[in-house]
Amino acid sequence: MRHLKSGRKLGRTTSHRKAMLANLATSLLEHKSIVTSTPKAKEARTVVERLITFAKRGDLHARRMVLRTIKHKEIVKELFDEIAPRYQDRNGGYTRIIKIGRRNGDNTPLAIFELVGYESFKAEKIEKQRQKREAKAEEKEKEVETGEEEPESEQPEK
């Protein structure tokens, strides 16, 4: 029986689970929003909230504690300099989990795992991607138009 045993195993060994949760936390802090399975998001929430609480302290020991989990110094710097100050007067609840349905292949419940207060960041990122796609499509149309004017060279068959 597993009475009073907290946490999910997620079908992994301890070392694999720790590495996966650290990777999820790193990705979330880098991108501000990720799509993952609901159980993974619920487990990663504890890791991320703890890291942000450490970052709010801002001292050297807290930075070293965060570096135990997140190995990328640039992301740790961003966490301490940009993310943690936004949550200075908030006593927890730094993340949000929004359920979005189930994955087609294996019917796993999926969720959007995001940092609270970074919704506009996600919208800006999506808008930039859309503009990039449109620019690429226009460029391709121009190539097609110029390609029609020039005669195509025929390649000999083998």
Image: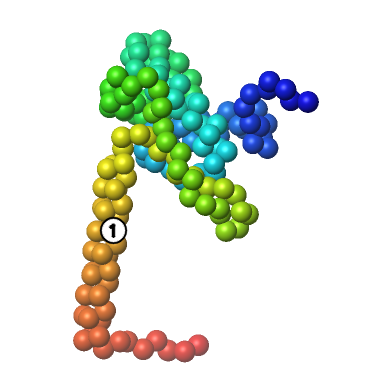
* Pointer 1 local density, CA inside 10 Å: few below 14, some 14–19, many at least 20: few
Disc 1 residue type (three-letter): Arg
**Relative side of 19 to 65, left or right:** right
What residue is rendered at 27% in x and 69% in y? 137
Identity of the residue drawn at 36% across and 38% down: 32
| x, y percent for residue 12 | 66, 35
Q: Where residue 115 appears, x then y in whole percent?
A: 37, 34
| Residue 28 seen in render | no
Task: Tell me if residue 25 comes above or below residue 122 in the rendering.
Answer: above
Image coords of residue 133 (percent x, y): 29, 62
The answer to which image quadrant residue 55 occupies is: top left
Identify which residue, 12 or 71, lies in the foreground: 12
Say which residue appears at 27% left-offset and 72% top-offset.
Answer: 140
Quarter holding the N terminus?
top right
Q: Is residue 22 above or below residue 153?
A: above
Residue 71, position as x, y percentages in the image? 45, 26
Q: Which residue is mark 1?
A: 130
